[in-house]
Amino acid sequence: MNKHLLYILIGLFSMSCLENNGDEKHVIFAGEIVNPTSDQIVLFKGENAVDSVKLDSDNRFIFRLDSISEGLHHFYHNPELQYIYLENGDSLQVRLNTADFDESLVFSGKGEEINNFLLEMFLVREEEELFVNSLYGAEPEVFQQNIDSLRNNKLSLLEQTKTEFDISPKAYELAKALITYSTNLSMEAYPYYHRRRSGEPKMHQLPESFYNYRKDINYNDKDLTYLRPYYNFMKFHLGNLAYNMCKSNCGDKIERAGRHLHFNDHKLKLIDSLISQKQLRDNLFRNVAIDYLLKHDTEENNQRFIEDFKKLSHNNIHNTEIFTLYEGITNMQPAKVLPDFTLYSYSGEEVKLVDIDRDSPVVFYFWSGTEPGHFKNIIKRVNELKLEHPDHNFIGINLRTDKAKWKGMVESYELDVSEQFWTSNYEKAVQTLIV
C-alpha cells in the first residue's frame, strides 16, 4: 500500500468538524464517497445497525457517536460493505470511489493505523489467492511450508506496525486473528482441493504436524464472530471434523440416499458441542441449514433435518428465514400444487403461477436485466433445451428489473412474449419460488 495515500484526507474536513475536544469516548467517523451508488451510509456492529446518515450535497457524511462498543464494525453503502475497527476516542476519516471500491479506500485520522493495516491484509489475501490455489496440487509438506511463510511474513509486518504505531492490545489481537485464520483456512481446505487436483481416490495422508495450529483455536471468541476469515475458517473446519468423525465412526454403512442428511447432522452436533457464543452459534447453524436445504434432498430427509435442527438450535435469530425456506422447498416438491404467486404477462394481465399452461410440462427459469451476461447465457441454454425437449414449455420469469426495461429486452432479443412474465415482488419470489 502506498503510505503517502494515508494522508490525502487531512484537508477533507475542517478541524472543528472532526475535533473530539478531549472526549475519550466520543467517536467521529466521517468521509467522502466518490460516485455514490446510494444516498446513505449505515454503520453496523454485527447484525445491528448502530446509526445511519445521509450524504450531503458534496457526497460527504459524518457520524458523531457518544460512545461505541469497541471492536470490529462495518459500514454499508449499497451494494458494498467494508470492515472498520472503532475504539472510543477515534476520529476517523475515509475516502473511497465506488468505481474501484477496495483499491481506492484509505483511512486517516485517529484510528487510521489499524484500519489501513486490516485493509492491506484483505487486499494481500486477494492477491495471494492465485498463488495459494496453485499450491493445492503440491505435497502437504510443500504446501504447509509455503502457507507458514505467508503467515509469518504478515505476522512480522504486524509486529513492525505495532512497534511504529500506537495500536491497542485488542486491535492487535484482531489483526493477528485475521492473519492466522485466513492462512489456516487454506490448511483446512488443502486435503479436499488436493484430492480434486491429484485425482487420488482417497484423502492424502497428512504429516502429524499439519494441523498443529488447531490446538490454539478459540471456538467462542465474540470479538471475531463477524470477522469473515474466522467465520469461513469455522465453516470449513467443522466440515473437516464432521467428515473425519463420520469416517472413523460410521464407515460405509450409510446408504448413499441418506449421506447428505447424515453428514449435515454431524455438523449440527459439532456446532452444538463446540460453539457456545450465541451469535456465532446461530450463524453457523444457519449456514448448515441453508446449505443443506438448497441442495434438494428428499422431502422425508428435509423433514428429518428440520426436526434435528429444532432440537439443537433453540431460538435461532435466523429461524424465520430458515423455516420460510423449508416451507418454500416443501411446497415446490414434485406432485405438490404450485404456490399462490401472481405474475404479469407482457400485455400487463395478472396471471397466477398455477394457471400457466396446465396442458403440458413446464420448466420455469429466472433472469434479471441487471445481469446481462447471465441473461444471454440462460437464453442460449433455454433455446438448446427447447430443441431437446419439444414437448415442454419453457417459461421465463423476470426479477429485479424495471417493467419498461424488461419489455424492451423481450423485444430486443425477440423472445416469445407468451413465454415471458414479470414480477415486481422480488422478496416474495425468493421466498416462494426458492430462486
Image (cartoon, rainbow, N blue to C red):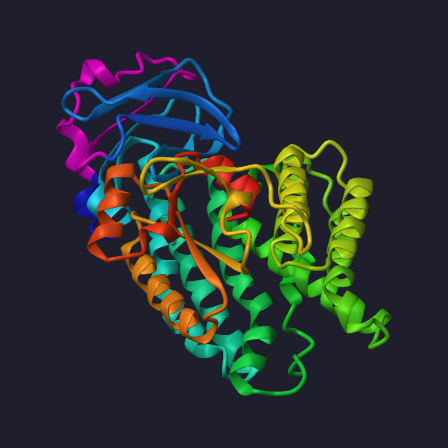
Residue for point 55% across, 40% down = 431
Residue 195 included in the magenta stretch of the image: no
* Nearer to the camera, 236 or 304: 304
In screen coordinates, is 171 left or right of 101? right
Give the magenta range: 7-36
Across and down, in percent, residue 427 comes to 48, 36
Q: Is residue 126 above or below residue 204?
A: above
* Nearer to the camera, 397 or 66: 397
Residue lying at the far front of the rendered structure: 359
Across and down, in percent, residue 182 comes to 49, 57
Q: Is residue 387 visible?
A: yes
Q: Is residue 230 above or below residue 391?
A: above
Find residue 79 and report its image quarter: top left
Residue 17 included in the magenta stretch of the image: yes
* Nearer to the camera, 139 or 426: 426
* Nearer to the camera, 125 or 322: 322
Residue for point 18% across, 44% down = 5
Q: Is residue 350 above or below residue 410?
A: above
In screen coordinates, is 111 left or right of 330? left
